[in-house]
Amino acid sequence: MKKFYVTMATLLFTMGMIAQTVDKATVEAGASAAKKAGEELKKVDTGEKAWKFDGVVGLNAAATGLVNWAAGGKNNVNGLAYAKLHLLYHKNAIAWETNFDTEFGLTYIDQKEDAFQKSSDQIKLATKFGWEFHTDWYLTVLAGFQSQYALGRDYVTGYNPVISKWLAPSFTDISVGIDYKHSVNGADFSLYLSPIAGRISTAYISDATNAALNNEYIAYCNDKGETPDPTWDYAQKLKDKYGVSYYDANSVKMYDRNARAEFGLSIKGAIAYKYENLTLGTTVAIFSPYAGKGFDLNGTDPYFKYSNKNRQFGLFDVDWDVSISYQFLKVLNVTLSTSLKYYPGTLIANSDGVESERVQFKSVLGLGIGYSF
């Protein structure tokens, strides 16, 4: 009997060892198969492309014709060409997004003086490269540029002074921060925060262009039999207007610069939504430099309230753009766009010629040939 129990115990122990060996082999085989299936699954084309390109391009036009119109007015034609383009690369943990927003408009008015007038002029380019370190969260490097194409003039009776031009002003931004991206119900949402942001503002005008514009002013005064202002200088006026010039606190001497470089805080937000033929987008960007308050050595010079052009922390540069576009009948497009800006230190004259910092606002409603994609 004792021999029987020993034999049975030995048999059970052997079967257990065999079972463990079988179970281990089965698990290893299953794990290997699952790993191989996962690798094969990664190779499957789900139809989702790494590159995505969309936007709106179009041409709006309007004409007004008047004959014996008692209420007054003048015949005019308005034209505006625009493009809002968006390019996105997103694969694995890498996202690279670029936006280009531009427009240029002209107005023809049936009159002898200043028949052609610029109505709109904008260049906006922004690109950001991000690495996704957590779901929807990206470590991001961002760069942006804003300016315009042609000379901008203040259209008044008589001489029309230049108030803006290519690179006067321009704003170049470079920053590093955290970007949150999320999509829900067809809307793409983005919020970017950078405590390490640089902004370069320019009011550049070449010597040749400055001389030509100054001669234009002198010729106008001579034609009118007036004495030109000996202190008139376009380059200096644009530098003062856009806050590039400043006073040195020690020598009380104004130094001229073509550019102002600042280091500060940047926050940017964006929402993009597209549903069938409707496209909606809005962006807001604010920037505040890490700088101290202005100074006034004697309290009598009115320019000193803009000694550093109010470039101090807590005062924000603001850019807020909204665009709504609806496409119908395949080629016709109705668009509404608004733009709000506020820049501490940028001086804008009112109807009385008094210069101060002001909120800038522009709206454009147009119907024309357009294409959304």
Image (spheres, rainbow, N blue to C red):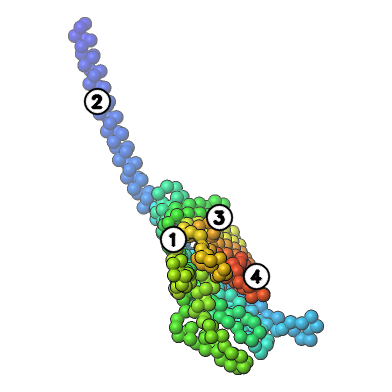
Residue 366 coordinates in the image, percent (x, y): 64, 72
Number of marks present in the image shown: 4
**Element type where label 4 sits in the image:** strand
Which residue appears farthest toward the front when viewing the image?
Answer: 298
The crowd level at tag 4 (other Cα within 10 Å; few <14, some 14-19, many 20+) is: few
Q: CA distance from mark 1 to mark 3?
A: 32 Å
Kind of residue at badge 4: Leu
Q: CA distance from mark 3 to mark 4?
A: 23 Å
Indicate left or right for 198 with 65 as reference: left
Towards the viewer: 104 or 275: 104
The answer to whether mark 2 and mark 4 are in CB contact below 8 A is no
The crowd level at tag 2 (other Cα within 10 Å; few <14, some 14-19, many 20+) is: few
Indicate left or right for 5 with 55 as reference: left
Kind of residue at badge 1: Phe
Kind of residue at badge 3: Ala
- Answer with the quarter of the image where residue 97 lies: bottom left
Mark closer to the chain start, 1 or 4: 1
State whether residue 184 appears in this view: yes
Residue 278 coordinates in the image, percent (x, y): 61, 62
Residue where numbered disc 4 is placed:
365
What residue appears at the point 55 percent right and 54 percent down from the top-left corner?
Answer: 186
Name the mark on residue 18: 2
Mark 1 or 3: the one toward you:
1
What residue appears at the point 52 percent right and 76 percent down from the top-left corner?
Answer: 238
Name the mark on residue 263: 1
Name the mark on residue 187: 3
- Answer with the quarter of the image where residue 173 lies: bottom left
The answer to whether mark 1 and mark 4 are in CB contact below 8 A is no
**Element type where label 3 sits in the image:** strand
What residue appears at the point 44 percent right and 83 percent down from the top-left corner?
Answer: 207
Residue 106 coordinates in the image, percent (x, y): 60, 80
Kind of residue at badge 2: Ile
